[in-house]
Structures are given as structure tokens and as C-alpha cells.
Image (cartoon, grey):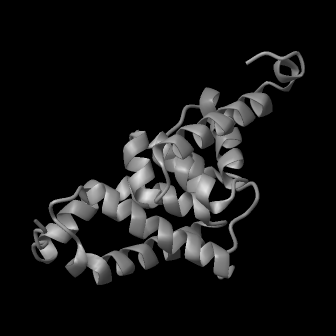
């Protein structure tokens, strides 16, 4: 049975609880800080427009991911904001991620890897890194759990090879 969403206060409270999701998606689908802010605003506007249709009996996070990723992918495809092949981090981005200096290189490599993926795989990896289950990822992206597992395993193998090219040359996993 579909439950109707509550009003504006409910929307804002849920949005605030999941604000990190918006930042991660915007970060992965935008080239500059200004584009990230614009994309976040566009996602929030679309979430608000879609709010009356939200089924309150389903998880808000799943619905939010679906809407946010659709907006980001649509904009990336229209090349209004062209997603880079490898999105470099600027100093403000590194500070925003609150990483220590020793992890900075790994974060840069991971973000460059994610930025180089096509829209579907980028969304899949973001959901995976967010801790979503294969079932939740499949629901958000509209693909099977088996497809999710296969794509995640391939991405892991590719990332391992990228992070350790010598090990990949010698067949190490």
C-alpha cells in the first residue's frame, strides 16, 4: 500500500539526512566546484518536483538515489556539464573529503577511476561505496543483482590492476 509523503518539513529532514549522497553524486558527475553546486541544486529541485509521487512505504534513500542519478546522468549525456574522463581533485575537494595526507593519493586515484567510468558503472560504484546492498543497487539502477555483482567484480579487478600494474602483469589479484 502506497503511503503519501508528508509535507515540506519531512522532505527537508530526509534530504538533510542524506545530503552526503547528493555531494558524492555531484562530485562524480561534475568537473568544477561551481558545476557541482549547480548539479546539487538541480537534483534538489527535481527531488522536490518528484516528492508528491514518492511512495513512503519504500526507502527514501533508494528513491533519492534513483532521482539524483537520473538527473546527473541526463545532464552528463546532454553535455550541459560534461563529466570528465578523470576528474582531478582540487584542494577544496580534498579538504571537503576530510582525508589525511597519507590517503590523498589513493583518493585521487579512486576518484579518477570513478570519473573515467561510463554513467551506469559510475552510478553502480557510487552506490556500492555508499554501502548499498546488491539488491538495493539493482533496484535503483533497474538491473539484475547478478549484473550488479558482475559489474562490481569487473570494476574491482580493473581498479586493482590500475593501482598495482606490476602485480597485474604477473597475474596477481
Residue at the (70%, 31%) spot, across then down: 157
Whether residue 92 is visible: no
Q: Above or below — where is 51 with respect to 105?
A: below
Total of numbered circles in the picture?
0
> Which quarter of the picture shows residue 173?
top right
> Which quarter of the picture shows residue 54?
bottom left
The N terminus, quarter of image = bottom left
Residue at the (20%, 68%) spot, across then down: 55
Residue at the (75%, 54%) spot, across then down: 86
In the image, 61 versus 82, the foreground residue is: 61
Q: Position of residue 132 (x, y in %)?
A: 39, 43
> Which quarter of the picture shows residue 16?
bottom left
Q: Above or below — where is 137 with respect to 152?
A: below
Q: Above or below — where is 163 with respect to 94?
A: above
Q: Where is residue 69 in the image (x, y as percent from the top left)?
A: 48, 65
Query: Relative to 166, is 26 on the left or the right?
Result: left
Whether residue 125 is visible: yes
Q: Position of residue 161 (x, y in %)?
A: 78, 29
In the image, 5 versus 145, the foreground residue is: 145
Residue at the (57%, 70%) spot, across then down: 73
Amino acid at each position: 500500500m502506497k503511503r503519501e509523503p508528508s509535507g515540506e518539513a519531512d522532505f527537508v529532514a530526509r534530504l538533510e539526512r542524506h545530503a552526503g549522497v547528493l555531494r558524492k553524486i555531484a562530485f562524480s558527475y561534475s568537473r568544477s566546484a561551481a558545476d557541482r553546486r549547480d548539479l546539487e541544486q538541480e537534483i534538489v529541485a527535481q527531488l522536490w518536483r518528484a516528492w508528491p509521487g514518492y511512495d513512503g512505504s519504500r526507502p527514501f534513500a533508494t528513491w533519492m538515489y534513483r532521482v539524483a542519478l537520473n538527473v546527473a546522468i541526463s545532464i552528463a549525456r546532454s553535455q550541459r556539464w560534461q563529466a570528465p574522463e578523470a576528474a582531478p581533485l582540487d584542494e577544496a575537494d580534498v579538504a571537503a573529503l576530510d582525508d589525511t595526507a597519507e590517503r590523498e593519493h589513493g583518493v585521487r586515484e579512486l576518484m579518477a577511476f570513478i570519473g573515467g567510468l561510463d554513467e551506469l558503472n559510475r552510478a553502480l560504484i557510487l552506490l556500492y561505496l555508499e554501502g548499498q546492498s546488491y539488491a538495493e543497487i539493482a533496484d535503483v539502477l533497474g538491473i539484475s543483482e547478478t549484473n550488479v555483482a558482475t559489474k562490481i567484480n569487473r570494476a574491482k579487478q580493473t581498479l586493482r590492476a590500475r593501482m598495482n600494474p606490476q602485480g597485474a602483469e604477473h597475474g596477481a589479484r
